[in-house]
C-alpha cells in the first residue's frame, strides 16, 4: 500500500508552519501489519503480554486499610499454627476425661430456692493410654481410654498398644491436646483419672454427639412455617414450597439452602458448664445445664476454654491423686 495525499487546490497559496502541521495530520500513512517475526521489521516491536489484572494507573494510591508494615506475615506451617494457639491461650494445661451421660435431674438452691436442671455424668475406669509429643507427632496430646472391652473383640494392633501402656483394653479411646510437656508430665501413662479431676465450682466444656433424628422435613429440622391450611393448598401443608430464587439468582438453588434432610447425629460442644458436685466413690460429676446426646452416650469433659483455668495440682497419679490409692480409699469408704 502506497501513501495517499489529499488533493490540494490549484491556485498557489502560502502556508504557515501551523498549516503545514495540520496538512501533515491529514496525510494518510500506510498501516504496518504485524509480522510473524519482529526481527524482520525493525519498526515493529514485539507485543508485551500482561498476565493478571493491571492497575489503571501507573502508580496506584496506597490503601489506608493495609498500611501496617510492622505486622508479621501469616504462615501456614504446623509450627506457626501451634504458636498462634499458644499466643491465644486456648490450649488447656491438663487433659480432660471421658464420661458417660447417665441422665438429667434437678437441684434446688437452699439460699434462693430456685430450681436448676443438671446433667449427671459418670466416669468409668478412665486411664491414660498414650502420649503424643511435638517431636514425634507434631503436637502435645494425652490419649485417654475409658470403659472395658472383651479381649476377643479387640484387634491385635490395639492389644499391643494397650499392652505397651500397661492398661486393660478400653472401649473408648480419645485424645486431649495440652499446651506443652508439663501437661504430659502431669498425666503419666497408666495413671487413673477419677471424678476428683474436676473441682466443684469450676467450668467445663462437654463435647458429645447429639441424638440422631433421621430424615426430617423443613418444619421440624429448621422450624419453618409450612404452607397455608386453606386457600387451595392440598396435601402440601408441611412442604417447603419453591426452593429457587428469582431471575437474579440464576434460576438455581444456592448451596447451603435449608431443605429437608438428615437431622441430628452431629458433634456438639456445650461450653462453660458449671460443676455443681463431684462424687469420687461413684465417679459422678454433676454439671449445671444440658449436654447433647442420648443416655449412655460418650462425653468428652475438659476445662472450659472461655473461663479461667482452674487452680489444680498438675500431678495426677504420682502422689495418688486420682490414682490407685484414691480408688482403693473410695472402695473402702463405699464398703
Image: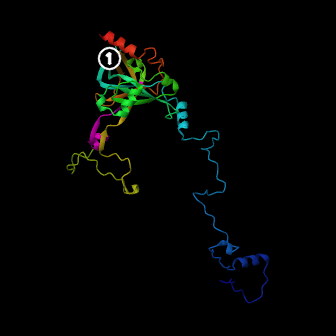
- Residue 129 shows in the view: yes
Q: Is residue 254 above or below residue 291?
A: below
Residue 165, how many percent across, how many down?
41, 26
- Residue at the far bottom in the pictured view: 10
Which residue shows up at 79% across the image and 83% down it?
14
Please tell me whether residue 98 belongs to the stretch shown in magenta: no
Q: Quadrant of residue 175?
A: top left
Front residue (pair 136, 1): 136
Q: Is residue 153 above or below residue 274?
A: below
Q: Mark 1 sits on what residue?
A: 282
Front residue (pair 90, 54): 90
What's drawn in magenta, residue-wise? 204-222
Residue 309, how many percent across, how many down?
48, 22
Residue 16, how many percent across, how many down?
79, 78
Q: Is residue 45 above or below residue 83?
A: below
Which residue shows up at 30% across the image and 44% down it?
261
Which residue shows up at 65% across the image and 68% down it?
46
Which residue shows up at 73% across the image and 90% down it?
10
Q: Quick one: quadrant of the C terminus?
A: top left
Amino acid at each position: 500500500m502506497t501513501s495517499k495525499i489529499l488533493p490540494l487546490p490549484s491556485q498557489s497559496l502560502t502556508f504557515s508552519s501551523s498549516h503545514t502541521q495540520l496538512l501533515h495530520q491529514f496525510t494518510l500513512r500506510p498501516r504496518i501489519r504485524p509480522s510473524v517475526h519482529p526481527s524482520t521489521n525493525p519498526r515493529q516491536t514485539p507485543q508485551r503480554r500482561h498476565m493478571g489484572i493491571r492497575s489503571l494507573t501507573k502508580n496506584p494510591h496506597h490503601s489506608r486499610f493495609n498500611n501496617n508494615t510492622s505486622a508479621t506475615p501469616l504462615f501456614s506451617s504446623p509450627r506457626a499454627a501451634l504458636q498462634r494457639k499458644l499466643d491465644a491461650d486456648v490450649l488447656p494445661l491438663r487433659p480432660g476425661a471421658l464420661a458417660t451421660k447417665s441422665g438429667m435431674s434437678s437441684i434446688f438452691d437452699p439460699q434462693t430456692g430456685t430450681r436448676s436442671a443438671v446433667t449427671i455424668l459418670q466416669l468409668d475406669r478412665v486411664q491414660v493410654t498414650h502420649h503424643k509429643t511435638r517431636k514425634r507427632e507434631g503436637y502435645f496430646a494425652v490419649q485417654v481410654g475409658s470403659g472395658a472391652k472383651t479381649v476377643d473383640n479387640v484387634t491385635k494392633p490395639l492389644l499391643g498398644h494397650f499392652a505397651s501402656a500397661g492398661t486393660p483394653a478400653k472401649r473408648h479411646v480419645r485424645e486431649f491436646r495440652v499446651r506443652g510437656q508439663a501437661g504430659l508430665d502431669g498425666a503419666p501413662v497408666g495413671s487413673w483419672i477419677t471424678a476428683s479431676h474436676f473441682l466443684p465450682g469450676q467450668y467445663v466444656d462437654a463435647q458429645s454427639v447429639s441424638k440422631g433424628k433421621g430424615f426430617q422435613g423443613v418444619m421440624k429440622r429448621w422450624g419453618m412455617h409450612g404452607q397455608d391450611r386453606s386457600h387451595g393448598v392440598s396435601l402440601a401443608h408441611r412442604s417447603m414450597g419453591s426452593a429457587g430464587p428469582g431471575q437474579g439468582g440464576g434460576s438455581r438453588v444456592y448451596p447451603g439452602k435449608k431443605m429437608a434432610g438428615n437431622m441430628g447425629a452431629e458433634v456438639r460442644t456445650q461450653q462453660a458448664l458449671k460443676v455443681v458436685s463431684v462424687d469420687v466413690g461413684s465417679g459422678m460429676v454433676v454439671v449445671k445445664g444440658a449436654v447433647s446426646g442420648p443416655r449412655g452416650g460418650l462425653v468428652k469433659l475438659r476445662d472450659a476454654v472461655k473461663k479461667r483455668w482452674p487452680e489444680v495440682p498438675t500431678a495426677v497419679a504420682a502422689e495418688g491423686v486420682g490414682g490407685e490409692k484414691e480408688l482403693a480409699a473410695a472402695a473402702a469408704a463405699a464398703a
